[in-house]
Structures are given as structure tokens and as C-alpha cells.
């Protein structure tokens, strides 16, 4: 690649994945093969020539406007195409096509619904809701599925809204945990501990002055339980993230 005097001309490309980066006051773009950009960013693909459709830096890929050497020098303080391309690929953002964006949004949408279905139950029937029913409830609440950093964070946001509004009877399913600690320590705190953390005590096993407790805890109390277990030198293990049928211990 090396130093190239880029012609200030137009090049028409089709079926491209664009990587865009703003440098200084101007925007620079690369025309890449679809899926190869993700491979490069993750370190799977090492060969830049296999990533780029053409070894040019553009001002606008869709219009075929190639960046001039003057623009590159002003923004990157070099005209070395190799180093400029490396920087754009590493720091730039992938611009999705309408089709790619629609596919990504649909995938995220389904992921959010699946997470909610797995983590929530009808508190009366103790059964999960199918994703289709959750989707209907969220649409009624005009919930925005897009602009999420992750499916999990968006799902937790949706769960909070569903529990608050109760468009359908819904609650977070309890979590099943096992806590091992000294029986002597447990006797000091048992009353307070059970009132604060234990929703349902499923088993209590004492052996050699060590007690094993298996119980259900409300999800909103789990972080505090983790901290508490550290304070009392207990060993906490998460057995089930969402208990549907209470009393069926999974060990």
C-alpha cells in the first residue's frame, strides 16, 4: 500500500460495508467487505487487503468521493495510506446498511424478549410468559427496543417497566442459591439474615460445624447477598437464575 497520491475523483462501489471516522473537522470512510471488518476488529483477520474492497480512503463511499492527499495530510499528518487505513479500521465505526440494521434490530428484539421470558413469571400461575405475549405488552407500553448497549441491559429496563405497570401480571422469578458458612457465625445472624435475604428456605444441612443453606432470594437482593456472604466469610453459589417451580432444588 504505502504512500499514494489519491485522485480526487469518484469510484462507484456496491454491496459494501463502510467504516467511518471523523478526524479533525472532516469525515473519512473505507469501503470494506461485509463481515470482514468484524473479523479484523476481533483479531481474526490480519490481512487488510482481504478487508478492503479498494485501497482508497474516501470522504463519502456512497458517492464515490475519494479523499485528497491534502485532506489526509491535514487530518492525519501523513499521506501514508497503510497507517491511515489501520487507524480508521481500529478506531472507526461500522456503518450498517438498512438491511443490516433491520436484521440487527430484529435479533436484538428477539434477544430481549427471550431474556424477559426466562427471568419472569406470572406470580399467580408460576409459569413463564411466551415471548409473543411479552412483546404485545411492551408494544402496549410503547417500549423502545432500539438504542441498547446490550440485550441484557435493555431487557432489565423492560422488566422494570412491566413490573411497575402490570399490563399483565408479572414478576421477576426468584433465584436459587447455596450458602456455606460456619454454623457459629450463622447462629449470630440467622434471624436478621433470613428476614433480609431468604424468601424461601429449601434446605438446611449441618455437618462438622459447617452449615449449608439452599434458599430462594429475590433478584433485587442478590447483589447485597453477595456482599453479605463476603462479610461473613461464606461461600455463595448461584444454582438457578430463575426458579419457576419453587421447591424443586437443582443441586
Image (cartoon, rainbow, N blue to C red):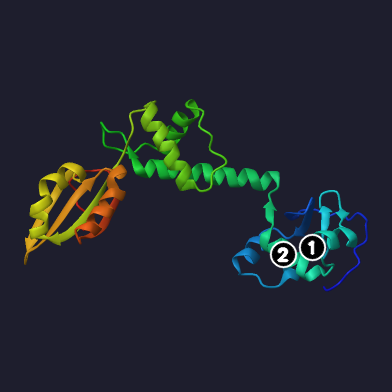
Where, by quadrant of the figure, is residue 246 drawn?
top left
* CA separation in Å, label 1 and label 2: 9 Å
Image point (63%, 43%), residue name: 102
Residue named by callout 2: 87
Residue at image mark 1: 76
The one of 229 and 129 positioned closer to us in this rendering: 229
Residue 199 in view here: no
Indicate the quadrant where residue 158 lies.
Answer: top left
Dots 1, 2 in contact, CB < 8 A:
yes
**What is the x, y in percent for residue 60?**
82, 51
Q: Which mark is residue 203?
A: none
Q: Is residue 108 visible?
A: yes
Q: Check disc 2 and report its element: helix, strand or loop.
A: helix
Q: Picture coordinates of residue 47 (x, y %)?
A: 71, 72
The answer to whether 4 is drawn above or below residue 24 in the figure is below
Q: Where is 24 relative to 90, above or below?
A: above
Q: Comparing marks 1 and 2, which lies closer to the viewer?
A: 1
Q: Which image quarter holds the N terminus?
A: bottom right
Q: Is residue 171 left or right of residue 144?
A: left
Q: Residue at x 31, y 42 (%)?
A: 220
Q: x%, y% of residue 68?
A: 89, 59
Q: Quadrant of the C terminus?
A: bottom left
* Relative height, residue 91 to residue 172 (above, below): below
Could you tell me which residue is drawn at 53 percent across and 45 percent down?
108
Going from N to C along the chain, the mark reached first, 1 or 2, is: 1
Amino acid at each position: 500500500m504505502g504512500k499514494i497520491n489519491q485522485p480526487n475523483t469518484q469510484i462507484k462501489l456496491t454491496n459494501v460495508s463502510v467504516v467511518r471516522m471523523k478526524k479533525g473537522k472532516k469525515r473519512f470512510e473505507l469501503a470494506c467487505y461485509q463481515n470482514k471488518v468484524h473479523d479484523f476488529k476481533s483479531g481474526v483477520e490480519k490481512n487488510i487487503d482481504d478487508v478492503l474492497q479498494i485501497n482508497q480512503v474516501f470522504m463519502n463511499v456512497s458517492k464515490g468521493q475519494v479523499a485528497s492527499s491534502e485532506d489526509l495530510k491535514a487530518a492525519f499528518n501523513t499521506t501514508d495510506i497503510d497507517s491511515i487505513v489501520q487507524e480508521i479500521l481500529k478506531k472507526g465505526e461500522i456503518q450498517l446498511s438498512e438491511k443490516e440494521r433491520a436484521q440487527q434490530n430484529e435479533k436484538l428484539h428477539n434477544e430481549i424478549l427471550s431474556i424477559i421470558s426466562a427471568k419472569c413469571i406470572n406470580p399467580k400461575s408460576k409459569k413463564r410468559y411466551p415471548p409473543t405475549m411479552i412483546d404485545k405488552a411492551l408494544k402496549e407500553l410503547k417500549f423502545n427496543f432500539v438504542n441498547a448497549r446490550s440485550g441484557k441491559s435493555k431487557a432489565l429496563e423492560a422488566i422494570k417497566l412491566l413490573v411497575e405497570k402490570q399490563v399483565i401480571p408479572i414478576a421477576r422469578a426468584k433465584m436459587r442459591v447455596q450458602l456455606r458458612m460456619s454454623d457459629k457465625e450463622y447462629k449470630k445472624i440467622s434471624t436478621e439474615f433470613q428476614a433480609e435475604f431468604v424468601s424461601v428456605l429449601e434446605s438446611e444441612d449441618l455437618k462438622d460445624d459447617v452449615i449449608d443453606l439452599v434458599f430462594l432470594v429475590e433478584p433485587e437482593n442478590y447483589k447485597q447477598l453477595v456482599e453479605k456472604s463476603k462479610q461473613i466469610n461464606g461461600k455463595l453459589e448461584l444454582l438457578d437464575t430463575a426458579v419457576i417451580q419453587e421447591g424443586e432444588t437443582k443441586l
